[in-house]
Amino acid sequence: MKPSDRSLDIAVIGLGQGGGNLAAEFARRGYRAMALNTARTDLSALSLGKANQPGLSEAQRLYIGIDGYDGAGSDLNYGRQCVTESAERIREAVARHTEGADVVLLTAGLGGGTGSAVSELVRVLEALELPITTLTTLPGDQESGIAKVNAVRAVSELVKIPELGLIFADNARLAQLHGKVTLDEYFERINEIIVEPLDAFNRLNQREGLHPIRTLDGEDLRTLLMSTGVLNYSQGDLPGLTVDGVSEWVNDALQSSGVMPAGFAMSDIAYLGLVVEASGDLLASTPFTFFNEVSERLKSGTSGAGIYMGVYRNDQMPSHSATLRMLASTPTLPKGIQSVVNAAQREGSALREKLNKSVSSLDLGELADLDLLPQRSGSMQPAAHKRRNVRGPAARRAPASNTRNQLESPLNVSSSSAGLRAARPAAQSTPVAASGLPPHSSGGSQPHAAAEPHRPEAQRSAAPAARISGAAELRSAPSSASAPELSRSSSAPDSYRSVVQPRPVPPPAPELDPAHDPTAELGDRSEPETYDRLVDAFLNTESESIRRRIATRLHSSRNSDHPLARFYANRAIERLVDAGAEEALESVMSTIGVQ
């Protein structure tokens, strides 16, 4: 049943932390709302409302994480994966929640790994044929380059979806105008500022003490909210009513909104709703021709936009004062969005350059070969450390949750089987050094004789050599001294020099001719779907020729100048290893000259 105090029945679905908080603000105003999140902690925080009032119930909070992880860790790809893998549960819950709604509002904070996957949520809900409009927030100036990169990628995906209304709230602008609000109240206050104008529009015809003279009804509001393109809404006060004053206020609200990104072009506006709320004294002194002139001025300034006007008398307002409310839509992005793109490019590139650098090695000199422990006699060997089996969900999750890998993916360092794996989580109980052996358990420098378990000389000579080929390559778990340092001293035993002597790095494998490459049509190297298909193709074929082509594609992407291509290529190799295709992958890699 439609609420009696509102024109439209709006159902709200919040995605991620920011989206959930906006949904909770709508719920406090009487709207039906629910929240989806990959973080249980964020969902739990929504159980309490403002000033300890009831918040969202357990039925209104849906956990959509994978394997029990608490949050997306700013990983947009993981957020998308969570939405996709929870698609059926999401559709079932949303269908119940939105039944009969006039408008379904999806709220999300762009920048985090979960909220930035809102375009994936829109696609998951397509089958329900819901009247969807999105309300999302852009990251503020103080937020990280990772958040800005996630946000602009999310905006890019949203604008590709046809017939979708888009509302962007600009956190940078909000912080500029309301930065003096105390920290403990800031976020609640900002959510109120974002939600209030929409709520006020929806209650115009039901608000006590407000008398309609010319109504902007529920269907007018629905038309404005469901108009495709980018929406802008604003409200403000004027000391009087003049044609010039109202026209200037509308233009200023589009150019420099208190909530939206700046730079909406007046001439590009397709629909514009304007509501004048004024005192009885002010309306009594305003001629009817004023409204005709305002309407004509707006039609002229917008080059023929659809204009919806409403006039309401509020006897409780001070004499000769007026409040204006505007809701407009345009098929073009405002210029303010480009400033976020510029910041993402600048900060993302700077972060990528830092991640390309490696930690400088220590020049130990004579310490590198200083043996302070007596030689052990006898044939007893210490028990070798066992490599911990980290395959399975945790291993698959680790590369995706690493925010560092969002902007820079490391490359392979070793010819051993460990070299085909991407970086493992730092929290593993038994990390493995570049040589395939565990690092020392104690801190500080250790003699190199202790760098590996005691083995006969022949076995040590046959151990695989670690290859460290530069800052762009993946660094494995730290050991007490780097392999090149061990080979510097001429006094080191021959067996040690044979273990650590770096081998020449083979040249990158050549690209296959796209005309004969069955993987050539798989898409952009920077898109995750490309590598998902490569993995599926490798696992589902017995053809060595096709596997060589896939291996060549992955090797080329790992050596690409594009950070996302390197990231997805390493993640694809990790998935192949975890799926049990390590031996097959090593085999085809060797045939194309890759160790």
Image (tube, helix red, strand yellow):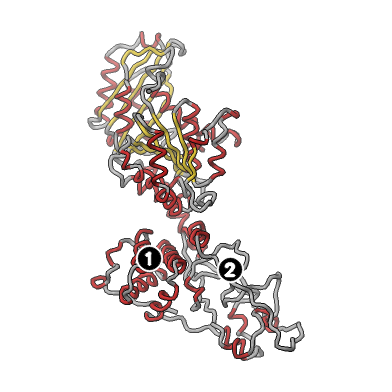
Residue flagged by tag 2: what amino acid is it?
Arg
Question: Percent x, y for residue 197?
Answer: 42, 27
Judge whether residue 515 can be spotted in this image.
yes
Q: Position of residue 65 (x, y in %)?
A: 49, 49
The residue mark sitting in front, 1 or 2, is 2
Say which quarter of the image contains residue 556. bottom left
Mark 2 crowd level (few <14, some 14–19, many ≥20, 10 Å Cα)? few
Q: Give the answer, above or below, for where 121 lies relative to 280.
A: below
Residues packed near mark 1 inside 10 Å, few (<14), some (14 to 19) or many (20 plus): many
Task: Choose the circle earlier in sequence order: 1 or 2.
Answer: 2
Q: Nearer the viewer, residue 92 or 545?
A: 92
- Residue 469 is tagged as none
Hey, what amino acid is under mark 1?
A: Val
Residue 506: where, in percent of width, then height? 43, 81
Residue drawn where x is 30% and y is 67% of the image = 519
Q: Position of residue 311 (x, y in %)?
A: 34, 16
Residue 343 seen: no
Question: How many labels, in total?
Answer: 2
Q: In which quarter of the image is the C terminus?
A: bottom left
**Residue 513 occupies quadrant:** bottom left
Q: Which residue is drawn at 38% across and 47% down?
A: 120
Relative placement, left or right, of 290 versus 342 is: left
Residue under pointer 2: 388
Q: Is residue 62 left or right of residue 231?
A: right
